Structure formats: structure tokens, C-alpha cells
Image (tube, rainbow, N blue to C red):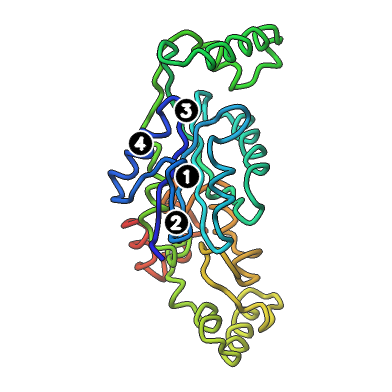
């Protein structure tokens, strides 16, 4: 399999601009979702899609062609403020309706801000947006959300909120070795991964005993099955349910601790880095 492909679904051009910029800085190919061929030849799909009519343009069609073994990263592009949590939560709920459950992972969903020039919009879209504007203007201000406020503020204008610096976390996903854990440890050197890869029951039992003692909890040999902290597939009970570092990163939508501005002063991951300088260096290079 080839490693990664960038696919985009663009309405007014912003998603295409982001996709082409991401392709430029990663060296990956970027293709319009309508023109994609042999999608199953790739391990990972990075999908950038315009928000339109309550969904992400082209996402459902793209996801329907993918196999369960593939990895899907999603970046939405819209006019509303992507830091508004109510807005992004609504977007995520709509994404759930467009893709199979196995592809839905909030740590792999990102939100970018787009652009629009009303003079270049086709007649059909202008009529639809005019009707929608009339409707949302009647809403009390307390009932307007980030999306409707953005529509009212930008209607009839030329605005450009595209910010290529917001591609940084997606760039990290595209360029970081997926076998490097969120904390920076190398999953390929982990006994749980080695035991899983080689189906080594003796190593499973040894690792379960050691981890039980270290974490003061019961970890059984059957829990020692892991294909990598950031990979799709099996994870140990510790990685999946007990690791506070992983919980923290996932809750903040970070691919690794290297994305976090507080990493240098974080006590959680600092405990790892104090005993493994290579782990910290891996995140700095990512």
C-alpha cells in the first residue's frame, strides 16, 4: 500500500487551497474527491471538505469507498469561527452521520476557516443563501450560532479567513511516524507491541505481571494486545483506559504531546521524558 493521499471536496475554493498547500509542504498528492481512483491503495486518507448543507462536501462518498483497515483524517472548512465549541460540536455530530462508526475519532478531526467571494457564487447558490439569510435574520440574537452569525456578517462581501498556519496539526499527522506514541515513546520497542506482533504468550504474561505491579491494578495477559498507541486496531487496557497522557491529548485534540504548548512544563509527560530523553526529542522533531 502507498502511505497517504490528500482528498478534498471544495465548493468555493478554500478547501482546495488548503489541500494544495498541505500537498506542497508534505510532498503528498492532492486530488478532488470526484477524481479519486484506487482509494484502497492508500493506508491513510487526509480529507479536507467544505461545510455545506449540513455536511462535509464529498466526505460520505469518499468514506463509503474506503476499507475498515484504512485511517481517515478529516479537516472541515467553513466561515464560522472554528474555536467556537458549540459550532465544532455540531459539525462533529453531522460528521457522525456521514461516515461509518469505525472511522470516527475526534482526535483526527480538525476545523479550518475558509473564504468566500459572493460575486463569484453561482446563481443557484446565491438564491439558496439569500433565502437562508432571510430565515436566520429573523432569529433572536440569543438563538444565533457561530455559523448563522458568520453568514450574516459576511453576506454579500468578499472575505478570506484562510490561515495556512492552522494546517500544522494535520501536517504533524502526515509526517509523524505513527509508531511513535503520544508521549514520544517508540511503540515498536514496547513489549506489548512485540508480544502482539509475534503472538508471544510468555512475553504477554511477563508484561502483564510487571504492568500490574507498576500500576497497582490487575492487568491480565489477554489485555496485552496492542498495535500501537496511535494506530487503528487493538490497544492494551492501560493504553486505552488508564494512560492519563493519552486521555489528555485525545481530549485536547492533539496528535501527540508535541502539539501541546504546555509540554515543556507538563508533569504527566515530564515523568516519561525525565527517564527517556529520546522520547522528548522525537516529539520535537515531529
> Which is more N-terminal, label 1 or label 3?
3
Image position of 266 with respect to 180: above or below: above
Q: Residue at x 63, y 73 (%)?
A: 215
> Which is more N-terminal, label 2 or label 4?
2
Q: Judge by depth and name the residue closer to the eye, 173 or 13.
A: 13
The residue where tag 1 is placed is 47
Secondary structure state at the residue bearing disc 3: loop
> Which is more N-terminal, label 3 or label 4?
3
> Which is more N-terminal, label 1 or label 4?
1
Where is residue 259 shown, x and y percent of the image? 43, 49
CA separation in Å, label 2 and label 3: 23 Å
- Residues tagged 4 and 1 counted as in contact (Cβ below 8 A): no
> Which is more N-terminal, label 1 or label 2?
2
The residue where tag 4 is placed is 165
Do we see residue 159 in this rendering? yes
Where is residue 111 shown, x and y percent of the image? 50, 36
Comparing labels 4 and 1, the label whose residue is closer to the camera: 1
Do we see residue 256 in this rendering? no
Q: Quadrant of residue 145?
A: top right
Q: Residue at x 46, y 42 (%)?
A: 33
CA separation in Å, label 3 and label 1: 14 Å
The residue where tag 2 is placed is 38
CA separation in Å, label 4 and label 3: 21 Å
CA separation in Å, label 4 and label 2: 30 Å
Image position of 178 with respect to 73: above or below: below
Amino acid at each position: 500500500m502507498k502511505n497517504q493521499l490528500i482528498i478534498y471536496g471544495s465548493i468555493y475554493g478554500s478547501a482546495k487551497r488548503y489541500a494544495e498547500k498541505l500537498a506542497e509542504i508534505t510532498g503528498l498528492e492532492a486530488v478532488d474527491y470526484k477524481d479519486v481512483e484506487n482509494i484502497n491503495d492508500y493506508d491513510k486518507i487526509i480529507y479536507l471538505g467544505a461545510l455545506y448543507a449540513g455536511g462535509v462536501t464529498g466526505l460520505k462518498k469518499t468514506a463509503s469507498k474506503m476499507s475498515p483497515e484504512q485511517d481517515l483524517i478529516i479537516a472541515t472548512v467553513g466561515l464560522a469561527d472554528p474555536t467556537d465549541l458549540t459550532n465544532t460540536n455540531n459539525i462533529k455530530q453531522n460528521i457522525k452521520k456521514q461516515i461509518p462508526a469505525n472511522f470516527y475519532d475526534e482526535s483526527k478531526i480538525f476545523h479550518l476557516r475558509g473564504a468566500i467571494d459572493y460575486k463569484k457564487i453561482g446563481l443557484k447558490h446565491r438564491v439558496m443563501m439569500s433565502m437562508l439569510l432571510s430565515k436566520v435574520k429573523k432569529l433572536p440574537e440569543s438563538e444565533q450560532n457561530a455559523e448563522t452569525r458568520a453568514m450574516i456578517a459576511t453576506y454579500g462581501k468578499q472575505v478570506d479567513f484562510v490561515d495556512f498556519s492552522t494546517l500544522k496539526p494535520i501536517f504533524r499527522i502526515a509526517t509523524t511516524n505513527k509508531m511513535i506514541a503520544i508521549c514520544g515513546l517508540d511503540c515498536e520497542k514496547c513489549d506489548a507491541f512485540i508480544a502482539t506482533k509475534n503472538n508471544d504468550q510468555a512475553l504477554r504474561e511477563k508484561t502483564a505481571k510487571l504492568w500490574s505491579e507498576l500500576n497497582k491494578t490487575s492487568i491480565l495477559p489477554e489485555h496485552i494486545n496492542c498495535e500501537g498507541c496511535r494506530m487503528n486496531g487493538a490497544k492494551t487496557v492501560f493504553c486505552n483506559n488508564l494512560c492519563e497522557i493519552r486521555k489528555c491529548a485525545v481530549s485536547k485534540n492533539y496528535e501527540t504531546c508535541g502539539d501541546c504548548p504546555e509540554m515543556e512544563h507538563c508533569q504527566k509527560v515530564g515523568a516519561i521524558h525525565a527517564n527517556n530523553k529520546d522520547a522528548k526529542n522525537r516529539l520535537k522533531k515531529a
